Amino acid sequence: MRNYYLVLQICSLLWVSCDTPNPEQEPSTTESTITEMEPAKYAIVIHGGAGTITRADLTEEQDAAYRAALNAALDIGEEILKNGGEAIDAVEKTIHYLEDSPLFNAGKGAVFTNEGRNEMDASIMIGADRMAGAVGGVSNVKHPISAARAVMEKSPHVLLTGKGAEQFASDNGLEIVDPSYFYTQRRWDALQRAKAREAENGTAEVELDHDDRKKGTVGCVALDQNGNIVAGTSTGGMTNKRWNRLGDSPIIGAGTFADNATCGVSCTGHGEYFIRWAVAYDVAARMAYKELDLSNAAREVVNEELVKAGGEGGLIALDRYGNVAMPFNSEGMYRGYAKPGERVVATYQE
Ligand code: ASP
């Protein structure tokens, strides 16, 4: 058995060294080591959005605030997993924290639509049986990720949208708030800037780089001590979106995917590309059909396919051994992971 794993490791090293990375898109270096020999008891990985996040964009205080929030979110999920809790609870509770923070484009910090509303999307998927739930375009549900979970557990459907999704959330006892709860000055100002640019250029400007060129969709993937993988994503979408636009975040296979046989994935970036490239599923498919390891499957999709297509963003993923990948092709991505004895939180290419 040991020899088998040794051969596997040597093969994976050879594969990595023969591969030709895209020179312009350095893969992120904050990835955990591929160790199929010693599966982690549990693992959790999160993102808080990808985009133009550079050292010049963030003050030291802002950077520290993001890192503190990512650490606090990881603490919540890790505590659940460490004590033998289920991955689904770790994902939901971790995302609650990120949804409650005004720093991220999800829940409280959601961006504004062209009409000046907040329309949020979320999805969740279980790797054991591919059960999934999602909501799109909800404006009064405090925790959209819980609405997604409720759709999965309490309805025969996978994706509910708009008024129907809100009614379903309320009928199932989820916390409903006045839409004004989601108002934050900085997101409002970002919408006004997008509209001003639109007026100036005469073309529809959907802001990928909302909030002064930073993104903030949130996601979490967890592996629990029973070997189950769960992935979840929650977002306000893109600043100045209109016509009830939905991005990739509520679309299973695009923004979120989980299968215990391969991996769990949560994405962030220009949703239209992530939908068309079926990004989350593509990572799992490359593991299943090309027999790539997690790191190479994720890198191919984000740093090769999406780069060729012009789709900006990144993703977080983990496999059943607790290996973690966090590739992105933008300048930065708020991200981090935790597993026994290991903790990483990062913002830029570092
Ligand atoms: N993927 C999200 C969307 O297109 C946005 C983001 O990740 O920032 O709605």
Image (cartoon, rainbow, N blue to C red):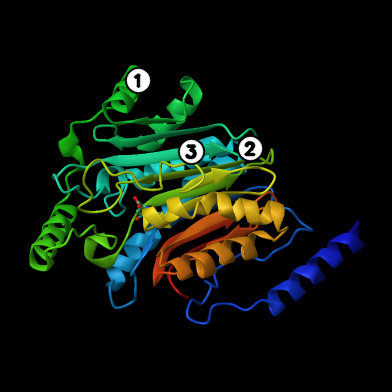
Name the amino acid, label 2.
Gly
SS assignment at label 1 = loop
Name the amino acid, label 1.
Gly
- Residue drawn at 42 percent across, 44 percent down: 95
**Sequence-wise first label, 3 or 1:** 3
- Residue drawn at 34 percent across, 21 percent down: 168
> Which residue is identified by label 1?
173
Determine whether, in the image, residue 75 is placed left or right of residue 122: right
Label 2 vs label 1, nearer the camera: 1
- Residue 259 position (above or below residue 6): above
State the separation of the CA atoms marked 2 and 1. Answer: 27 Å
Label 3 vs label 1, nearer the camera: 3
> Which residue is identified by label 2?
84
**Sequence-wise first label, 2 or 1:** 2
- Residue drawn at 13 percent across, 44 percent down: 115
Q: Position of residue 51 (x, y in %)?
A: 35, 65
Residue 319 visible in the snapshot: yes
In-front residue for pair 261/39 = 261
Say which quarter of the image contains residue 179: top left
Say which quarter of the image contains residue 147: top left
> Which residue is identified by label 3?
124
- Residue drawn at 47 percent across, 20 percent down: 154
SS assignment at label 2 = loop
Q: Quadrant of the N terminus?
A: bottom right
